[in-house]
Amino acid sequence: MCGIAGSTARDGEAAVRRMCAALRHRGPDDEGIHADPAAETAIGATRLSIVDVAGGHQPLSNEDGTVWAVLNGEIYNHPALRRHLLRRGHHLQTRTDTEVLVHLYEDYGDDLVHALEGMYAFAVWDACRRRLLLGRDRFGEKPLFYTVRGGRLHFASELTALREGAGGSWELDPAAVDDAFVHGYVRHPAAIVRGVEQLPPAHTLVWEAGCATLRRYWDLPEPPVEPVLGMTEAVREVERQLEESVRSRLLADVPVGVLLSGGIDSTLVAAMVARTGTGRVPTFTVGYDAGAVDESAPARCAAERLGSEHHEIRLRSDEVATRVARLLARIDQPVADPALVALNAVCEAARGRVTVALGGEGADELFGGYPRYRWLSTWAGLRGRVPASLQAAGARVLGALPARGRRLAGLVGSTDLGLVNRDWMTQGRAGLRGSLYGPRLRRHLDPTDARGQVPGDSAHAVAAALMRLDRHAWLPDDVLAKADRAAMLVSLELRTPYLHRGLAELAATIPALAHQAGGGKPILRAVLARVAPDLHLRRKTAFRAPVADWLRGPLLPMLLGQVERGTLFAEGWFDRGAAAALVDEHAGGRADHSGALWPLLTLGGWLDHAAAGLAAEEVAGAA
């Protein structure tokens, strides 16, 4: 695991040194830079040593120094690729995965990405052709930001590092700020600042002769309506593929553990690790001393059954404010997912014992785990048979019920399942734009923004569309961004066995509706029953956090200070009076506004720290 950076500017080497300094937390063990002065190009990396600790210094080159590479992440199949390259006559000097990139590029050029299994963002510099190739893994596990300024390309693993290298003025993108509030994250390819983009997952970028060319190299096919495999065969094949994935992700010359939430996904990973016979696996979970979402008990039970070396971290209320402030000061782009706080806490604790941890990210998006998939697809299959008058009457009745009833009222009374899906995922924040947005945001609001709508009327089409939308946006921009930042801020490598290419492509051969049978993820439940038959897990949601309680308790002073003095309100992005009213109602217990207040706190805290690096005339521009 590393941080990478590069520049084609005249002062590229100095720029890359500045970017690497900002990426030290991603790679505290080593740093290296290769500069090609004649081509005015430099690439660099900071390294967290995982494989070939002594010999894996980056950048790495081929035998004659004409091709150089830097890598952030892990290529899990690099031992097989290394054997393949040796048979073809290549000479490799290390056991590290970065070195296979240069030799694969020699043989296959840009198509080298098709040989890679792993999580990665990489750069390959071809000195003879004066050509730079950037690539990002299939699901977006590893980040990569880039910008073109004055005809020069700059790239880095994090936005803050890119700012150090590219220089110039930086201006917040109002559309991205809107995204960060409504969705809780900035949807790629945009970034929170103008003129910067994120390389999309499963894409390459070629920089040659001052021009950038992007290409998608992979995607999952649309799922079939009818199953390709029988249930028994599908379960056995998923079990085989998952075991292969877990074994590949245990490859390391440093200690490895598992982040265990007590749910199906992480418990199955832990059970697979235990099956490999590599010894008593360290497992880690997080609990709370506030609220009603502490799920450490099922994790403890699972650990006992699996015989793991279990470690339970208690995130206390008196440390929440300090941790949140530290996260907002260090994260490069806002992610308004409160699970970031819990995940960072458990990663920090795990880092004291292991350098690599396995997690359960991606299982819900590939195997149909979210309840909204079932609600929305079921209604899509029913609504054509329910008269409009009855739908309207049902919506009125449901609207008079408590929270869940009102949620269902929105479903029954809507003609656009895409908007219902968005409102469920974002807790209705789009409806608050009119009252909460200040003049600086309001004038940029696009009422025609329809990204994320769900096509199709049949239950199958809706289910498939929902899973596809989550894989393309929610997974890379929230789930994986959160996992990457939470872990890398404490120099921990987090690996995700469910995002194995073969396993994902196998999951795509199973009808979307079949993934939702029996309450969701029936295939994974069946695999767990085979791997650990004595385990009986209750349904849960991993890494939830008691946000409402925090915002009434330890985070209330921070929230009040943000509304009173924060840049977010002082510069006209949000309306201070409207936000203060929400805070007053929430703090008094008259309503739960945590769904809106958490993104405001996250955005505001991030902006207060980022503003120092933004050009003053840009940040404080007239509304």
Image (cartoon, helix red, strand yellow):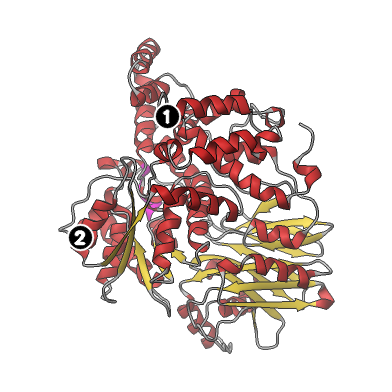
- Stretch of the chain drawn in magenta: 507-512
Image height of 44 relative to 63, above or below: above
Where does the image place residue 164, in percent across and percent down from the top left?
72, 61
Q: Residue 292 at x, y = what percent?
A: 30, 40
Locate residue 235: give its quadrant. Answer: bottom left
Q: Is residue 399 left or right of residue 489?
A: left
Q: Position of residue 44 (x, y in %)?
A: 67, 73
Q: Earlier in the sequence, mark 2 or mark 1?
A: 2
Q: Is residue 20 magenta?
A: no
Residue 104 located left or right of residue 146: left
Determine whether the residue tagged by mark 2 lies in a helix, strand or loop: helix
Residue closest to the eye, 498 or 144: 144
- The one nearer the camera, 131 or 307, is 307
**Residue 281 rendering spot, x and y as whole percentages:** 29, 70
Amino acid type at image mark 2: Arg
| Image quadrant where residue 302 sits | bottom left
Q: Is residue 521 left or right of residue 534?
A: right
Question: Dot 2: few (<14), some (14–19), or many (≥20) neighbours within 10 Å?
Answer: few
Residue corresponding to mark 2: 530
* Up/down of 1 relative to 561, above or below: below
- Residue underneath mark 1: 592
Instruction: Inspect the image, locate mark 1, and give the three-letter code of the amino acid beneath it.
Output: Asp
